[in-house]
Amino acid sequence: MVPAAAQGQQAPTAAPQQAAATPAGPNAAAANPSATPAATDPTPGASAVAPATGAAPAFDYAKPTPGIGQPDGRAGLQDQFTPVGREASAFHNNWLLVLCAAISLLVLALLVWTILRYRRGANPTPSRTSHNTAVEVAWTLLPVLVLVAIAVPSIRLIRHQYSPPPADLTIKVVGNQWYWTYQYPDNGGFEIVSNMLKEKGEAAAGTRFRTDDDGPRLLAVDERMVIPAGKVVKFIVTSNDVIHSFAMPAFWTKTDANPGILNETWVKVDRPGVYFGQCSELCGARHGFMPIAIEVVSPERFAQWVALKGGTMPGATPAAAPDSTAATTVSPAAAPTAAAPANSSAPAAGAAN
Ligand SMILES: [Cu+2]
């Protein structure tokens, strides 16, 4: 938090560059006709869309819950909301920490006892003993047993982490200097561009700034990734420029985003809500300003969100559903389709496959 806060002071100077240079603003507005950002976005395209968004069935993004999916000043790990996360945090809190504390106390007690019992005043003629078989066996065997006691649950955890169940949904996560894009290949291939929201005083006049409904400072974004609850979601993680890291502490997920390489991780989150993470690989000047926000919603609401983004649900009959939605939203319906070629061409060029 210290580096992020320190960089936060530079944010006002960097703000105009970012607003002018990154394509994310227009893309986000075009790909997202229904959400609130469009209403406050000053770009011409967005303002044309704005009047219709009021009437459109806008997607109600959830408010974050303090203490869940974000840091809240507590020491220790965040509460976990994936099976792997619960297993890992239990392993850490109930086993590793206990073991560490017990070993530390044992060593400290031996040290104190030796210092007091065998000091020169209490023990003027020291023992000449140089070998003691029983003690030597004990101090070899005990550490081995400790390592085994750590290795067994640890390897089990790694197995659970890296042998995911079949994915219900795949999302391609792409790191960019300094924002994230999320592609939904299972849902028609639409793309979300996710930028950090600036504070009220830092955002350019007329642009959207962060409110508490968006999330905490330095963590709230203009476009959240949305995933369905209770489903296995596979993340294919890569980068367009330098090494980033896609990290979500409440899901026990941290995966490097390397240019030219596809890394893979997965989550299964049962609790709907909003969760925050950050890029966790030093990636440049604005490394501290590319947070990750994931909103977990019911599968029904996920389908609704996909339709509003101009995407489709795989398998089912929903070809008609997005169309009927689009028909009622009038001008927003044109925006996603118009933006689609522009959006899809850039990631295709940067794709690592
Ligand atoms: Cu980064």
Image: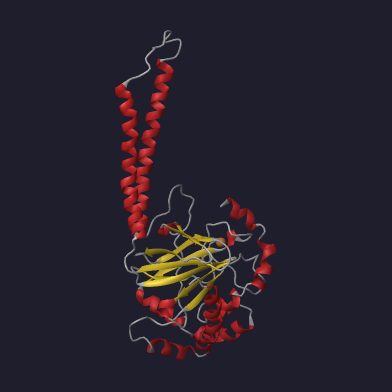
Tally the marks.
0
- Is residue 213 among what the camera can see? no
Which quarter is ligand 1 in? Answer: bottom right
Give x and y (percent) for residue 54. Answer: 52, 83
Q: Relative to 125, does residue 80 appear above or below in the rendering?
A: below
> Would residue 74 appear left or right of 205 to someone viewing this image?
left
What is the image's colouring? secondary structure
Quadrant in the picture for residue 339: bottom right
Give x and y (percent) for residue 215. Answer: 51, 64
Residue at far top of view: 125
The residue closer to the viewer here, 27 or 242, is: 242
Residue at far left of view: 134
Give x and y (percent) for residue 347. Answer: 53, 75
Q: Relative to 194, does residue 58 appear above or below in the rendering?
A: below
Residue at 43% across, 67% down: 235
- Is residue 158 among what the camera can see? yes
Give x and y (percent) for residue 145. Answer: 31, 37
The residue closer to the viewer here, 86 or 170, is: 170
Residue at 61% across, 75% down: 23
Residue at 37% across, 34% down: 103
Residue at 31% across, 32% down: 141
Quadrant in the picture for residue 187: bottom left
